[in-house]
Amino acid sequence: MPEAQYDDGRAIAPTGGGGAMDLATAEGETLEKAPAAPPGPGPAGRPRSLWSDAWHDLRRNPVFVIASLVILFLVAISIWPQLIASGNPLDCDLAKAQQGSQPGHPFGFDGQGCDVYTRTVYGARTSVTVGVCATLGVALLGSVLGGLAGFFGRAPDALLSRLTDVFFAIPVVLGGLVLLSVVTSNTVWPVIGFMVLLGWPQISRIARGSVISVKQNDYVQAARALGASSARLLLRHVMPNAVAPVIVVATIALGTYISLEATLSYLGVGLRPPTVSWGIDISAASPYIRNAPHMLLWPAGALAVTVLAFIMLGDAVRDALDPKLR
Amino acid sequence: MGRYVIRRLLQMIPVFAGATLLIFLMVNVMGDPIAGLCGERECDPATAAQLRKEFGLDKPVWQQYLTYMGNVFTGDFGTAFNGQPVTELMADAFPVTIRLTLVAILFEVVIGIGLGVVTGLRRGRPVDTGVLLVTLVVIAVPTFVTGLLLQLLLGVEWGWIRPSVSSEAPLGELIVPGLVLAAVSLAYVTRLTRTSIAENRRADYVRTAIAKGLPRRRVMTHHLLRNSLIPVVTFIGADIGALMGGAIVTERIFNIHGVGYQLYQGILRQNTQTVVGFVTVLVLVFLLVNLLVDLLYAVLDPRIRYA
């Protein structure tokens, strides 16, 4: 995950603007300008805030609508997989191993004779849980640490910046292999914990950059002059205006965490059976890809669609929050 | 310039120490380093104690770390599970992975920047929308799925390539694995270049250059491209380290005996010295490449000066 690695306050600031990965600088500038820009009058004639303006755009963006529908569907089937799959994902019949599509079993059977359709549906729960929990953890830890460092500056900031440098120097998949190779737990929590541990620097860097650009605004200075405490400044004035880039990057990161879980499971260190996961199923199917490609293609397709939905959602949200690119 | 380089090199020291310490601690969590030394059986207590003493594992972790780093700076990276010095493994593995990474970077530069320029100049046209959609799909499909599918199609079904790379790993056999390794970054490079070009195209200096009658080609290459490439170069630079470390998946699929393969073996066999040694070198490569990228800014953008 090489996202936005270069907005780290090096001696020179890259002059990049609003690239796919270049959220920290671009969003920071945008947020400064957004309240000042003449907002189009809303239906009631009131000036719209950045958020309602963004929502106004998003509702009309087909990419956003499609991605949201896909995500809603995924969330629904991760909570109630029985809605569309009546079977049990662990109910397998070796006699049917690797057989293709049959009436009642549209996706065929996998190497253990389990119904691929049922397993693909139930796999959504694992992926969505890992993605959502890891993203929440990373976003929370990253924005708290990055926000504090950016707001208070000085020694904590220097320390945090060096710490993020340290974490960025370690390849993620490698860290996962090392840390998760000893875990024998069958739950998703070690994987989530690992992602939070190695993922927070990415968000903290963006939160830091965003807070630094917001805290120079006049309204923050005004509140400070009025005698507001640091806590009030941070919570009421800085954070609400600095959070947009974090949300954008976190949404895109959610997709990459789902993909990372599958990659780690493929390497044999992520989740383990009997957990039902697309990564595990793809990994189990890969030796038989020649004879029974359907075993691999369905979970891989589901994985790709899920990751795509989250990336498209993040993309649409960024476009809505960054009027500079219009 | 010289002073800037020295300052950056000094700044690298804490990051290098931190990253190696982090991986050292992680590997220590990974498991008992001597567990793998007695074959499939467990070591008997006396041998275990003897081995512990021999490797200095009875000392506290920070002392082990210092000893290890001291050895590394004299060129001694320890011994791998099969008794070979880790440096020998590195001498075999790194050339292969460097070749693979070079192929991947070449794809990123040629195809990624090429597509980015084409789409950036034609924003909103069908070709732009099409390429954007394709990049999203490429980003969404995990590398191991891309790799397995390409291996199946090109290697097994159509027979265009060898499904697994031979142990010498000549450049020709690394083209498809390199493409697989580059795929996701390639898509990011395309998007980044596109945004950058599209934004700078409206810049005043481009209008001036066109207005004073410069040939379009010259405006594109000397004015637009040069200014737009700065974020792209940063990305590609940061990506070199990520590609070398991320080659684990690609090397596993195509059975390439490079850094990723050795790391995977080291982790499976719980050989701490192999893992820490390879990661130390990777971290060093990552830091140096980042420094090089920063120096490259001055070449691309003469406004940037290093004091």
Image: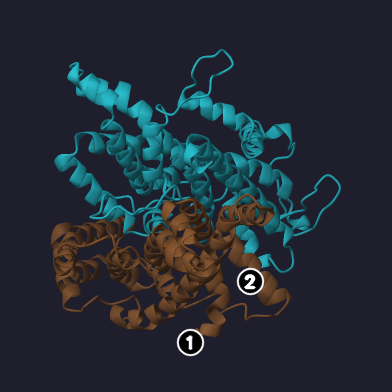
Chain colours: A cyan, B brown
- The chain carrying label 2 is B
Q: Is residue A126 visible?
A: no
> Is B152 situated above or below A223?
below
Disc 2 residue crowd, few under 14, some 14–19, many 20+, Cα 10 Å: many
Give the quarter of the image for residue B222.
bottom left
- Measured as percent of width and height from the top left, residue A93 is found at 74, 51
Residue at 70% from the left image edge and 80% from the top image edge: B159
Which image quarter is the N terminus of chain B in? bottom left
Which image quarter is the C terminus of chain B in? bottom left
Instruction: Give the amino acid at mark 2.
Output: Gln
Instruction: Give the amino acid at mark 1.
Output: Glu
Q: Earlier in the sequence, mark 1 or mark 2?
A: 2
Q: Which residue is mark 1?
A: B168
- Measured as percent of width and height from the top left, residue B126 is found at 69, 53
Q: Which mark is residue B151?
A: 2
> Is B295 situated above or below A158?
below
Residue at 39% from the left image edge and 79% from the top image edge: B93
Tell me if A31 is positioned left or right of A318 in this view.
left
Residue that extends furthest to the top in the rendered view of this protein = A44
Depth check, front residue: A197 or B127:
B127
- Measured as percent of width and height from the top left, residue B258 is found at 43, 76
- Measured as percent of width and height from the top left, residue B12 is found at 20, 62
Q: Is residue B279 visible?
A: yes
For label 1, the SS is: loop
